[in-house]
Image (spheres, rainbow, N blue to C red):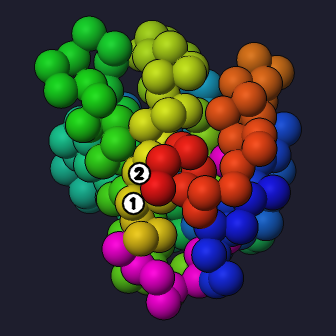
């Protein structure tokens, strides 16, 4: 566990975003926001058909941005934040991935959430290398904490695969600087 500041914390969790009780879970969604595979499909199945109905009304989402819905049958969360991550071959992959994490935190705070669980966005079929994605996630979270020093947020980085957990652990071990990326 890393204390970023007194009010906020980043924790690693070996498992799915569906395994933690938080105010908001982040879905690694596609641009249509309609059920896909991986974590997206699992979240849609857990939330039930009302989630798909609401997602249809949102008219999709741009890559690098997020939209928020109710959590429906996922009773241990209030909201689902659908983050559309980039493919590794997309222009601006670094900025778009960073923005997914930052924007999700903004939406969570705007909806009075104080805990959020992220999957590893874009590291599956979108092909972003895990270490690259993890660094962007940690940098975006650190920037958001710096920009919102008075807002308490418990951020849980869920690592479904052992490789993800090992990389995040390596990147965050020995953290003492106040920034999860080791900067600052």
Q: Estimate the x, y position of residue 3 in percent, counting from the top left.
A: 71, 67
Tag on residue 18? none
Q: Residue at x 77, y 34 (%)?
A: 169
- Name the residue nearer the viewer: 5 or 55: 5
Residue 66's place in the image compared with 73, above or below, is above
Residue 25 visible to the viewer: no
Side of 172 where 86 appears, left or right: left
Q: Is residue 83 visible?
A: yes
Q: Is residue 174 left or right of residue 130?
A: right
In the picture, the disc for residue 140 is 2
Left or right: 67 with respect to 69?
Answer: left
**Relative vertical location of residue 43 with respect to residue 171 in this rendering, above or below:** below
Compared with 110, 99 (above or below) is: above
Element type where label 1 sits in the image: helix
Q: Residue at x 24, y 37 (%)?
A: 95
Q: Are marks 2 and 1 in contact (CB under 8 Å)?
A: yes
Left of 61 or right of it: where is 126? right
Local SS, label 2: helix
Residue 48: in magenta span: no
Residue at position x 54%, y 44% in the image:
181
Please name whichever residue, 117 or 144, is drawn nearer the observer in this view of the structure.
144
Residue reaching furthest to the left: 91
Q: Is residue 43 above or below residue 110?
A: above
Residue 134 is drawn in which quadrant? top right
Mark 2: few/some/many CA within 10 Å (<14, 14-19, 20+):
many
Q: Disc 1 marks which residue?
A: 143
Q: What residue is shown at x 84% (from left), y 38% (from top)?
A: 14
Position of the N terminus by quadrant: bottom right
Q: In this picture, which residue range is highlighted in magenta?
A: 147-159
Residue 55 placement (x, y as % from top left): 36, 53
């Amino acid at each position: 566990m890393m204390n970023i500041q007194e009010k906020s914390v980043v924790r690693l969790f070996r498992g799915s975003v569906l395994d933690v009780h938080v105010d908001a879970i982040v879905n690694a969604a596609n641009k249509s926001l309609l059920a896909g595979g991986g974590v997206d499909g699992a979240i849609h199945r857990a939330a039930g058909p009302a989630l798909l109905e609401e997602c249809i009304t949102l008219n999709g989402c741009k890559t690098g941005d997020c939209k928020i819905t109710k959590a429906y049958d996922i009773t241990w969360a209030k909201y689902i934040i659908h983050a559309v991550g980039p493919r590794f071959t997309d222009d601006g992959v670094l900025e778009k991935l960073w923005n997914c994490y930052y924007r999700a935190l903004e939406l969570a705070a705007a909806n009075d959430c104080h805990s959020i669980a992220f999957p590893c966005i874009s590291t599956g079929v979108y092909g972003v290398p895990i270490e690259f994605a993890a660094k962007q996630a940690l940098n975006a979270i650190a920037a958001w904490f710096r920009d919102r020093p008075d807002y308490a947020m418990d951020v849980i980085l869920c690592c479904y695969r052992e490789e993800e957990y090992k990389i995040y652990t390596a990147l965050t071990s020995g953290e003492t600087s106040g920034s999860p990326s080791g900067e600052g």
